Image (cartoon, grey):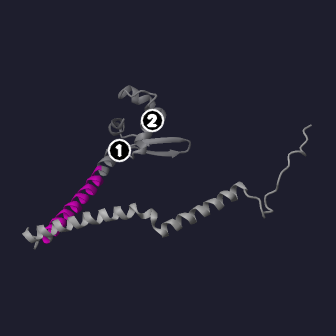
Amino acid sequence: MMEIFFETKDVFQLKDMEKIAPKEKGITAMSVKEVLQSLVDDGMVDCERIGTSNYYWAFPSKALHARKRKLEVLESQLSEGNQKHTNLQKSIEKAKIGRHETEERTMLAKELSSLRDQREQLKAEVEKYKECDPQVVEEIRQANKVAKEAANRWTGWPRKGTGWLPVVSFHKLVVH
């Protein structure tokens, strides 16, 4: 459909496009409106409402400028990415200075990993015994107390000392 706009370099209404598109490009007349709307949504075709009519147009120069802008944006992103890459490579090279593999370094790395493993095991063991911690047990009791009070508040149970919940007696109801 873009070829119709580019070849004629003219402005069309929807009814004109519904006549021209099936004849020249073989687009079914029922889908012309949907295709045209999708092109407008993608910014490839311009649409303007003048009075009660919608006018559609697209010129090759606009598509060329859009591609040039997109190319400029992509080129700037590429140059930024390349700059970032070179900066990271320089950082890696700086970090490698003084980090030669020595026997002492490998031994310290092994010791570090074993200490980390031991720390994880100890954390797991502490987590296993956490249920017996008096502070955790007290927190659970407080949470249970709050939950019980909330349940009683919503259900209206027990009624002792509260005047806010009326007792309804059903024996006075009379159905006519």
Q: In the image, is 62 to the left or to the right of 47?
A: left
Is residue 118 shown above or below 50?
below
**The disc labelled 1 sits on which kind of residue?**
Phe
Tag of residue 153: none
- As for residue 47 lying within the magenta part, the answer is no
Is residue 37 shown above or below 135?
above
Marks 2,1: beta carbons within 8 A:
no
The residue sitting at 10% across, 73% down in the picture is 98
Alpha-carbon neighbours of circle 2 within 10 Å: few (<14), some, or many (≥20)?
Answer: few
Question: If the image is split into quadrants, where does the N terminus sit?
Answer: top left
Q: In the image, is 95 to the left or to the right of 118?
A: left
> 83 or 74: which is nearer to us?
83
Relative image position of residue 49 (x, y in whole percent): 51, 45
The residue sitting at 48% across, 69% down in the picture is 134
Main SS of the magenta segment? Answer: helix
Asked whether residue 131 is in view, the answer is yes
Alpha-carbon neighbours of circle 1 within 10 Å: few (<14), some, or many (≥20)?
Answer: some
Is residue 129 shown above or below 167?
below
Q: In the image, is 143 to the left or to the right of 130?
A: right
Question: If the image is split into quadrants, where does the C terminus sit?
Answer: top right
The residue sitting at 18% across, 68% down in the picture is 111
Circle nearer the viewer, 2 or 1 = 2
> 13 or 2: which is nearer to us?
2
Q: What's the magenta region? A: 67-94
Q: Which residue is mark 2?
A: 34
> 2 or 72: which is nearer to us?
72
Q: Which residue is mark 1?
A: 59
**The disc labelled 2 sits on which kind of residue?**
Glu
The answer to which image quadrant residue 25 occupies is top left
Q: Indicate the secondary structure of the residue bearing disc 2.
A: helix
Q: Indicate the secondary structure of the residue bearing disc 1.
A: loop
